[in-house]
Amino acid sequence: MRMAFPKRLVLLSAAALILLAGCGSEMSDDSAGVPPGDSQAVGDDRKVVRVAEVDLAIEDLDTALGEIRAIAGDADGFVSESDIVIDNSDDPQVARPERAIVTIRVPVSEYDAVLERLRGIAAGVDSERSSVVEVTEQYTDLQARLNNLKAAETGYLDLLAKAATIDEILRVQEFVNTTRGEIEQAQGQLNVL
């Protein structure tokens, strides 16, 4: 006799696998201990990443995966990782549930609405865990580095305009190119946050 198990869809969080992360939210000191799903006035001094891990019981895995992609897309987010395990057993006595681990990223402004929509596609929510990771220091360091790199690039461009020989132009252009690459890298890291 084959036993029916509900299919599982697990949306995992950072540390293990990042699920639903949005950053750029700012929290005041009096909201530091507030779980991410709670409404709370936010201040201007903290940058945080909000993370949720949700274990959903679903009826149809393919349909749920499509709905998750749509939910992420509607929120200007995306599926960043998925791991799907399907029961391929030929033995009718052995039943293993289908299981998927899906990681999505959405802007922090969409965090609560996305969580609500994800709960809505499930036959049941088996567990849910939320956390907040402060990234203020990392964000501030990256912003300072970016500002310094932009100032250096401006200086190099001034030198390039004053270069008189091909040798001088090539040397300064190398510094400009290296600095431009570092600016793009730092900006990319800020964009991820």
Image: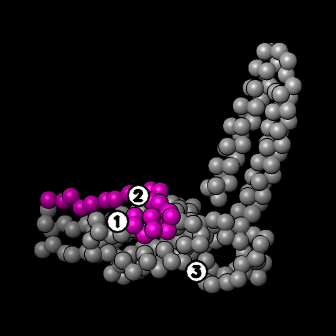
Q: Is residue 175 visible?
A: yes
The label nearer to you, 2 versus 1, is 1
The one nearer the camera, 48 or 148, is 148
| Residue 191 picture location, percent across and down | 64, 55
Q: Secondary structure at mark 3?
A: loop
Q: Where, by quadrant of the figure, is residue 119 drawn? A: bottom left
Residue beneath disc 3: 37
Residue at figure coordinates x 61%, y 77% from the top left: 36
The one nearer the camera, 191 or 88, is 191
Name the amino acid, label 3.
Gly
| Residue 120 picture location, percent across and down | 39, 80
Give the numbered dot on residue 65: 1
Residue beneath disc 2: 82
> Is 192 positioned to the left or the right of 27 in the image?
left
As for residue 84 lying within the magenta part, the answer is yes
**What is the spatial separation of the Cα atoms under label 2 and label 1, in whole angstroms?**
9 Å
Q: Which residues are magenta?
A: 69-90
**What is the spatial separation of the Cα atoms under label 2 and label 3, in whole angstroms?**
24 Å
User: In terms of sequence position, does the residue under pointer 3 or pointer 1 come before the other?
Assistant: 3
Q: Where, by quadrant of the figure, is residue 174 drawn? A: top right
Q: Are marks 2 and 1 in contact (CB under 8 Å)?
A: yes
